[in-house]
Amino acid sequence: MHKYDLSICLAAIRKDNWNKLYESILTSIGPYTFELIFCGPHAELPDELKGISDIKCIVDFGAPTRAQQIACIAAKGEYMYYAADDGVFMPGKLKKCLDILKAEQSSKKVLVTHYDEGGKNGLASYSCNFHEPVRSPYYPDSYLVFNSVFFQTDYFKEIGGLDCRFEVCPLAFVDLGVRCHRDGIKVLLLEEVVLSCTHMPDTSGDHAPVHYAQLGHDAPLYKQIYLNPNCVGRIYIDLENWVNAPDRWLRRFGKA
C-alpha cells in the first residue's frame, strides 16, 4: 500500500517560491492525498510550511538531476510528478490527471501533459525527433518528450529513474522518456497545462549554471548515447546511480 495518492518531487533552490507552490497544490489536487518533497541546499522549510507533516526537505548540494533523483526515491505515493519550484499548479488539474490515471487499466502507464514556460507554448511538438538536440535515428517520431509527466512511483523506481550523469534535468527527462517508450509503457497524453513555470532565457536570473551545464555537458552526452546504435537496448539503469554524481555541484555552489 502507498501512503499517498501523489508524490510531488523536486530539486529545489528557490525557497521563496515554495509556499506559493504548496498553495497551488491545494487548489489543484481535489480529494486526493499528496506529499511534497524538496531536495536541495536548504536545511529548513519556509516558516509557512514548517510543521506540515506531509512536506519533506532533504539537504543535498549535488546537481539538479541528482537532487531530483534523491527526492523521487523518497516518494511514497502511488503516483509521482517531478516539478519545478518556479512553477504553480493550475486549479483542478492534478485531480484531473489522477482521475485519468486511476481510470486507465494498463499495468504500466504514464501521463504526459502540456509543458508551459512563461505563459508560452514551451513545447512546439511533443515528439522527441522534432527537437534537434534530442533527435536520433534510433527511435521513432512517436516517442514523446517527458517534460511534464506523471509516473507510477513503483515503475519509476523499477526502470531506474533519472540518469544522473546528466547534470540538469531537461535531457535526463527526455532520456527517461525514451527508455519508458522502449519498455512498452502505455503513454497517455493530456494536452493541457498542469504546471505553469517561469522562463529564464540563457543566463538570465539564476539560470546560468543550468544553461552552461545543458549546452556544455548534457547535450554532448545525450548525442553520445543516442547517436550510437548500441542505445537501442538502453532501458533499465541503476536507481542508485545518483551516488556516482558529485555531492557538490560546483557550477552553482562552488567549493565548500
Image (cartoon, rainbow, N blue to C red):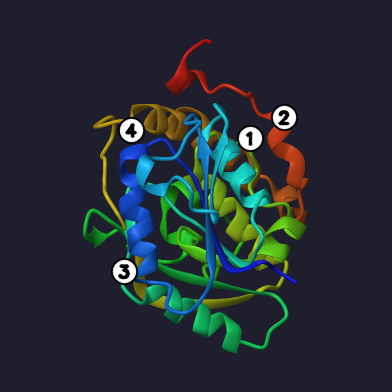
Q: Is residue 204 above or below residue 182?
A: above
Mark toward the start of the polypeptide (4 vs 2): 4
Q: Which numbered disc covers residue 207?
A: 4
| Residue 93 in picture, x, y percent from top left | 38, 75
Amino acid at circle 1: Arg
* Residue 7 quadrant: bottom right
Frontmost of labels 3 and 1 is 3
Q: CA distance from mark 3 to mark 2?
A: 36 Å
| Residue 188 in picture, x, y percent from top left | 53, 78
Mark toward the start of the polypeptide (3 vs 1): 3
Q: Label 1's element?
A: loop
Mark toward the start of the polypeptide (3 vs 4): 3
Residue picked out by circle 1: 165
Q: Residues within 10 Å of mark 2 (few under 14, many from 20)?
A: few
Q: Are marks 3 and 1 in contact (CB under 8 Å)?
A: no
Residue picked out by circle 3: 90
